[in-house]
Image (spheres, grey):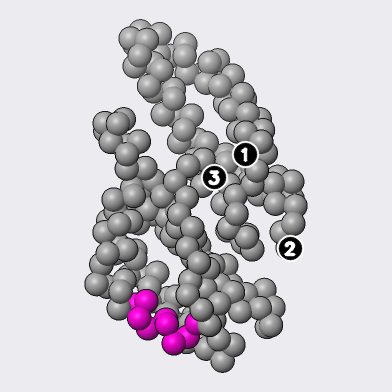
């Protein structure tokens, strides 16, 4: 895949906050089930996380959609299917939704159950990334580099970088975010 295209069309996470009328929570649960199933049929859809109200008095839902590319998210956002689902939700909610689109490193720091969709401060994200990359780099240098010495330098760099990014994105950062959640999100109620 072209690196320039990846930069212009990055993976994207959308965090949607909806305040639901107390008497409409059951109907909103049906809406969530329907819209998440519909979104899953669109190309590039990577998954959905739902954060439900924590107490009976709480009425805020957070729905986190992930897409592999901004262009695939745009196709979903502009679809008639999505428009029809959103029209069903209007009478169930107290106000317009709050939408936040994340396309950078802050998507590594998304807690499934986070009450706030605000990313942690950059210095905290940088610290966790550094704590994660150094051991991966050491491990990669000792295990993979010796196996790849016959390959051209740029190909070795590409392979080791791809492995590091995949490990960071899908294996390590979700665990590090949970492990350091109290430090990253000190004001979050659990």
Residue at position x 63%, y 28% in the image? 130
Q: Is residue 66 above or below residue 82?
A: above
Residues at marks 1 and 2, CA–CA distance in whole angstroms: 21 Å
- Residue 89 in magenta stretch: yes
Residues under numbered marks 3 and 1 in contact, where contact means CB atoms less than 8 Å apart:
no
Q: Mark 2 points at which residue?
A: 189
Residue 122, numbered label: 1
- In the rendered view, tell whether residue 111 sits above or below residue 80: above
Q: Mark 3 points at which residue?
A: 106
Q: Position of residue 188 (x, y in %)?
A: 71, 59
Instruction: Say which residue appears at 43% left-offset and 14% top-offset.
Output: 147
Q: Residue at x 33, y 47 (%)?
A: 69
Q: Quadrant of the N terminus?
A: top left
- Secondary structure under tag 3 reads helix
User: Could you classify mark 3 by the number of other residues whose Cα lies within 10 Å: few (under 14), some (14-19), or many (20 or more)?
Assistant: some
Q: How crowded is mark 1: few (under 14 residues within 10 Å), some or many (20 or more)?
A: few
**Of residues 133 and 151, which is closer to you in this image?**
133
The residue mark sitting in front, 1 or 2, is 1
Does residue 30 show up magenta in the picture?
Answer: no
Q: What element carries label 1?
A: helix
Q: Which numbered disc flags the more N-terminal residue, 3 or 2?
A: 3
Q: Is mark 2 on a helix, strand or loop?
A: loop
Extent of the magenta region? 85-93
Total label count? 3
Q: In this view, does 28 lie above or below 123?
A: below
168 or 53, nearer to the observer: 53
């Amino acid at each position: 895949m072209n690196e320039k295209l990846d930069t212009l069309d990055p993976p994207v996470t959308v965090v949607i906050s909806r305040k639901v009328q107390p008497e409409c929570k059951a109907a909103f649960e049906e809406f969530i089930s329907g819209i998440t199933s519909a979104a899953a049929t669109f190309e590039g859809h990577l998954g959905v996380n739902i954060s439900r109200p924590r107490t009976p008095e709480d009425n805020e839902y957070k729905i986190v959609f992930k897409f592999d590319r901004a262009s695939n998210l745009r196709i979903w956002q502009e679809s008639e299917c999505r428009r029809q689902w959103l029209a069903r939700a209007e009478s169930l909610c107290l106000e317009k939704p709050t939408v936040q689109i994340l396309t950078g490193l802050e998507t590594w720091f998304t807690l499934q159950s986070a009450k706030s969709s605000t990313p942690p401060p950059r210095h905290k994200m940088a610290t966790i990334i550094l704590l994660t990359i150094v051991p991966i780099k050491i491990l990669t240098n000792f295990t993979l580099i010796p196996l790849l010495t016959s390959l051209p330098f740029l190909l070795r760099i590409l392979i080791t970088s791809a492995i590091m990014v995949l490990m960071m994105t899908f294996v390590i950062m979700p665990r590090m975010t949970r492990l350091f959640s109290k430090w990253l999100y000190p004001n979050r109620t659990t």
